[in-house]
Amino acid sequence: MRSTRGLAATVTCAVLTAIGTAVAPAPAGALTPPVAMTADDLATWQTNGVVWALAQAQGVVFAGGTFSTVRPPGAAAGTSEQPALNFQAFDAATGAPTSCKLSFTVGSGTATVRALAVSPDQGTLYAGGTFGAVNGVPASNIAAIDIATCSVKSSFGVSVSAQVRGLAVTSDTVYMAGNFTTVAGEPRQHFAAVSTTGALKPFTADADDAGKSLAVSPDGTELAIGGDFATVNGASSHALAVVDATTGANVKTYPGFIPATSTVQNITSDGTSFYTGNEGTGSGVFDGRIAISWSSLGQRWRDTCLGATQAVIVYKSVLYSASHAHDCSSMGQFPQMNDRQHLLAESVDNPKPLLGWFPDTDDGPAGTEQIGPRALTVASSGGTDYLWVGGEFTRIASNGNRPQQGLVRFANTPDTRSPSVPLQALAANATGGRVLLRWQAGLDLDDTTLTYTVYRDGTKIGAVTGDSTFWQLPTLSFSDASAQPGTTYTYQVTASDPAGNTSAKSEATSVTTPGTPTSATTVVSDGADAYVNEAAQTTNYGADQQLAVRGTTGYTAYLRFDLPQAPSGMVLKSAELTVRTSSLSTGGSTDDLAVQPVTGSWTETGVTWSTKPALDSTVLGTLHAPSALQTDYSAALTASALSDHLGQSYDLALTDTGADSAWLWSRDAPGTSGHPQLTLVFGQP
């Protein structure tokens, strides 16, 4: 979780539960549907520069960009680096580099890889960018790589006159977009197609400015193209067009569809639609995303968030996007903010509301465009799907601003991170003898709906559910209908996601109810305890962390409690002894344990089997078969037997007639919970 941005709205939740009027909270789904990726970032190797392109095949992720080394997760720049000249392959499941290393170089200037695409048969990786050779093999801005051998296919040999920025591949065709004006020596203005063997195809879709991205229709007959252009094949169609996949002729043009101040940076496709990621400069820009039907080639929806979108990808009916969104108020979502949200998710059916998935990076270092993430791909390995994100970022803002440069990944594995702690808890008396508790909602970056459990004096008394996002942390409330008059109570709240990940408790808040108290509850921890062992009759176990109880061979445990006086005008109404079984593998018992008064004298440091005190034969209560480990077991005691000893020390023994030993935590056990205690409830005579 990360700190909130100070944009929380004050909204009171009307869903209330309380003792006596309990209403089960509405269950929250595991991750906010239809999101299937957690926001928990995974350990991933880093680059020392920008990752511009990602692709994947058979559990391997290929990263291309402008960088020269890679280094382990968490390593500072310059530490434990390995050479990786503008390209590296990674194991999708571990985030570590594979043995596939390629060096993309150029004779003059800076080499870079700007586009990667894998053939449908997963056998060939195509790379585009600015380079003149790959591993020393000549390659003019585009190359074909045999994935099995990680070697350049020199036979591909296509010459492209300038940078290639986008690629799309079918079984027999490689489509490219970029800054070029010739391919294989023939005129091709910013878009071209070659066969998978490198032969130039007659496809001609001439644009007047740079091409950046392409997507092939599901039936393979059409091609969506995007970029900086104003015309395609002489027709007005700013930044976007659909052309015939064989000839390049215009199928659909979009004059005025995208503002002249904006471009299409990336296009992705699913079985029914294609989706654009857009970037603008100046006023009146469009920076969001558009969904366009393949069947009608008409717009299905567009979102109007501001903050240039660099990459989009569909995974399980969710469109994930990489951008630096800073204002989605036109969508009814977060308002203009100084910080930027770099990763978003929205349903492919409707962009509103944004889905509750908000992992985040930083913008990137000085000297870059400081856009943040720039590339996305989903890879599968071992039954798990991984969303890889590449870009120019250097930190993961959603995980404590953890250093992480160039690459990060997420998975469709179970959520493991807890929501943030609810803040500003405040308890106040309300009408009708109730206590009204209010607090600010917590935040979970992949679960919008959280469950809040309310504790009174350390005991759970109810729960509410509420929705929250990083820009809206509402004020929630709970009404405690069981509060008694004239009593001081302390309240705390935790936040839990649907997977059961739970925050720490909020800071405590206390309130004293008006009026004369009619009841009071006091919890008393034992002040001394020990056990004795028939098999070691002169050994004292007073400092042991456990207490033992068994009939044969015998163990008997002793507990001493300093009982309080009854509050004025009250008498003891009930008493309950609670103990916790230890973690010892044989700690549980199938035998019942009896609670008896001790009539003889003993000391914690001196009692042994041979000096054990006498017991009253009366059984005050029974601990029934404490068989589970690390579990609390309670026995209701005869209150009248304790009443005559209020204000004094009172000793109890735990005995057993069976042969199955029980091991319980003593007051010397580590930690602050699980020690023996009495709960005394006082009330009116």
Image (cartoon, rainbow, N blue to C red):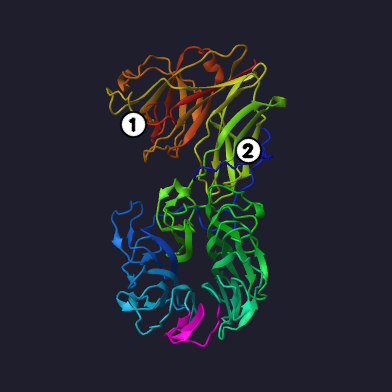
- Which is more toward the observer, 207 or 658? 207
Magenta region: which residues? 181-207
Question: What secondary structure is marked by label 1?
Answer: loop
Residue at screen point 59% across, 20% down: 520
Q: Position of residue 221 (x, y in %)?
A: 58, 82
- Which is more toward the observer, 74 or 282? 282
Q: Is 205 part of what is drawn in magenta?
A: yes
The quadrant where residue 8 appears: top right
Q: Position of 124 compared to 639: left or right?
A: left
Question: How crowded is the residue under tag 1: few (<14 C-alpha within 10 Å), some, or many (20+)?
Answer: some
Q: Does residue 102 appear anywhere in the picture? A: no
Q: Position of 555 compared to 643: left or right?
A: left
Q: Are marks 1 and 2 in contact (CB under 8 Å)?
A: no
Q: Which residue is mark 2?
A: 475
Q: Which residue is mark 1?
A: 553
Residue at screen point 33% across, 23% down: 542
Q: Position of residue 98 (x, y in %)?
A: 33, 66
Query: Of discs 1 and 2, which sits in the foreground?
Result: 2
Looking at the image, residue 455 lies above or below residue 315 = above
